[in-house]
Amino acid sequence: MEKFGDCVKRLRKERGLKVYELADKVGVTPEFITQTEKGRRYPNILNLEKISHILGEELKTLYFREHRPDILALIGKSRTLPRTKANRRTRKTK
């Protein structure tokens, strides 16, 4: 399973971007991109969205590849996430 940082690095290189170019487009420091690629830091959702857009990869693919590959497989088959404890709303009983 490819880790998030490894995926970002691979996609960045495939697109011919240098670390400082990706950092400039995302609006972060080159050090942040390097640390992200090494798995030491993780971008917030806004930066994650920018990175996925710049690299031409869907956000769900970038995120779920490392964290929940089982969900990624299901997303490809369905438009809705399966009901799990993580995404189930709890109802208050009266």
Image (tube, rainbow, N blue to C red):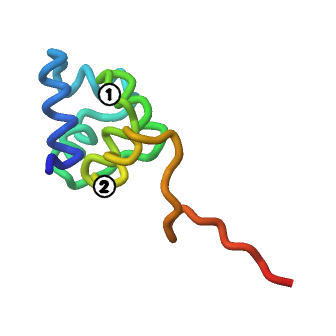
Label 1, on which residue?
57
Does residue 27 appear to the left or right of 82 in the view shown?
Answer: left
Residue farthest toward the top in the current orientation of the protein: 16
Quadrant of residue 17 within the rendered picture? top left
Q: Is residue 38 above or below residue 34?
A: below
Q: Which mark is residue 41?
A: none
* Numbered disc total: 2
Instruction: Point out residue 66 in the picture as x, y percentages from the top left corner.
Output: 25, 52
Residue at the location (29% across, 23% down)? 55
Q: Amino acid at mark 1?
A: Glu
Residue farthest toward the front in the current orientation of the protein: 77
**Secondary structure beneath label 2:** helix
Does residue 46 appear to the left or right of 67 in the view shown?
Answer: right
Residue at the location (59% across, 65% down)? 88
Question: Pointers 1 and 2 in contact (CB under 8 A)?
Answer: no
Q: Amino acid at mark 2?
A: Asp
**Secondary structure beneath label 1:** loop
Instruction: Point out residue 85 in the picture as x, y percentages from the top left corner.
Output: 51, 71
Callout 1 environment at 10 Å: few (<14), some (14 to 19), or many (20+)?
Answer: some
Task: Report the mark closest to the observer, 1 or 2.
Answer: 2
Quadrant of residue 47 within the rendered picture? top left
Residue farthest toward the right in the current orientation of the protein: 94
Instruction: Point out residue 20 in the picture as x, y percentages from the top left corner.
Output: 22, 25
Residue at the location (19% across, 38% down)? 7
Q: Is residue 90 above or below residue 70?
A: below
Q: Which mark is residue 70?
A: 2
Q: Earlier in the sequence, mark 1 or mark 2?
A: 1
Residue at the location (25% across, 38% down)? 33
Quarter of the image with the C terminus is: bottom right
